[in-house]
Amino acid sequence: YNIAAHPDQVQIEVEGRKVAVAAEQLHGAERTEAWDQIVATAPRFGKYQQKTDRELPVIRLVARSG
């Protein structure tokens, strides 16, 4: 919910560096394509999806300039 409320204020840490990113929830074909890649790499997410009635969100993080 925090990411959705403030998608332009997200930071991640990569190898000890803080990186400002923009967050975007994927929908439709984009979500399906990303989800297929996720479960191919980490099948446990597919197993978790089967245990819940809700669709798990897929969030794209893109580095912000500056």
Image (spheres, grey):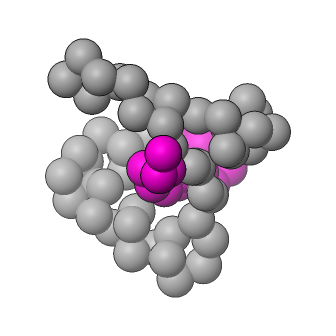
Q: Is residue 50 above or below residue 16?
A: below
Q: Quadrant of the N terminus?
A: top right
Q: Foreground residue, 53 or 33?
A: 33
Q: Position of residue 5 (x, y in %)?
A: 80, 39
Q: Using the rendered image of the protein, determine whether residue 55 is visible from the camera's viewpoint.
A: yes
Residue found 51% across the figure and 69% down from its top: 31
Residue found 58% across the figure and 49% down from its top: 23
User: Which is the main secondary structure of the residues drawn in magenta?
Assistant: loop
Q: Is residue 12 above or below residue 28?
A: above
Q: Position of residue 21 (x, y in %)?
A: 50, 43
11 horizontally vs 16: left or right: right
Any magenta on residue 62?
yes
63 horizontally vs 24: left or right: left
Residue found 28% across the figure and 64% down from its top: 37
Region of the chain picked out in magenta, as a range: 50-66
Any magenta on residue 49?
no
Q: Is residue 3 above or below residue 36?
A: above
